[in-house]
Amino acid sequence: MIRLSEISHEEAARYMGVQGEPDEKIARLLDKYEPIVRENLRPAYVYRQGKIERTENELKICGVSLLGNDIRKHLKGCEMAIIFGATVSSEADKLIRQASVTDMAAALAVDALCSAAIEQVCNAAEEEIFADVNAPYRTWRFSPGYGDLPISHQKELLLALNAQRRIGLTVTDSFLLIPSKSVTAVIGIRDSAPLHSPQGCKTCRMRENCAFRKNEGRICISMV
């Protein structure tokens, strides 16, 4: 079970579009709402390990067919992979709605803190997973919506993980995760060190419209 440590104010400020140190007003909002967010969220994750099956046009992991050239490149040299889903629970959406009723600045701060929290949860989940899974080397997390990996794969991944029953994670008809502060991803497992592969903005379909482009080189969590 993952327990949140203090949520990074630096990461939260980045999600608010802040470059450098946040000003006094933003710092006060983050100081005020960070403990509230941390105490109310209920992080959870689920994962499966499976052999990668390759055909000419697709990869298949745990019965999930993954399309696109970028995921093939990402998993090149990998024989096994992890699929996983993580969430900070519906409490995140509830806190954001409650704050938005009276103070949109507070709602923005809560939203950003929840985004930073799911990033922390994904990192912690990955460490727990690979404490139990033998993986001499592993790739970084690759989520639906990165590169040319269709976001529609959210649905298949959640079904393969039985995520709705196990951690309450579902997806809409337009492939948005519910709760909103959630992530699905694929992590490749290798026996040898991976070759360098592009990460972050260069592989993202949203790079032309992303508010984080001014911070290119830093990696956001897809769809948080």
Image (spheres, rainbow, N blue to C red):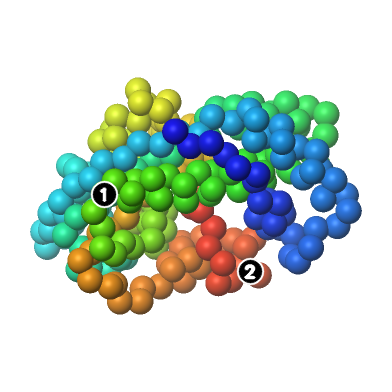
Residue that mark 1 sits on: 133
Front: mark 1 or 2 = 1
How far from the left and from the top, in percent, is residue 40? 63, 28
Please give left or right for residue 72 compared with residue 57 in the image.
Answer: right
Residue that mark 2 sits on: 215
Res. 96 image quadrant: top right
Please give left or right for residue 7 compared with residue 221 in the image.
Answer: right
Q: Amino acid at mark 1?
A: Val
Question: Which mark, by number, is residue 178?
Answer: none
How far from the left and from the top, in percent, is residue 190? 23, 64
Residue shown at the point (67%, 34%) measured from the top left: 37
Q: Work out whether mark 1 precedes mark 2 in sequence or the reverse, and give the earlier one.
A: 1
Badge 2 local density, few (<14 within 10 Å), some, or many (20+)? some
Q: Residue furthest front?
A: 131
Instruction: Tell which of 42 and 14 is nearer to you.
Output: 42
CB within 8 Å, label 1 to label 2: no
Residue shown at the point (62%, 63%) measured from the top left: 212
Res. 103 image quadrant: top right
How far from the left and from the top, in percent, is residue 142? 38, 57
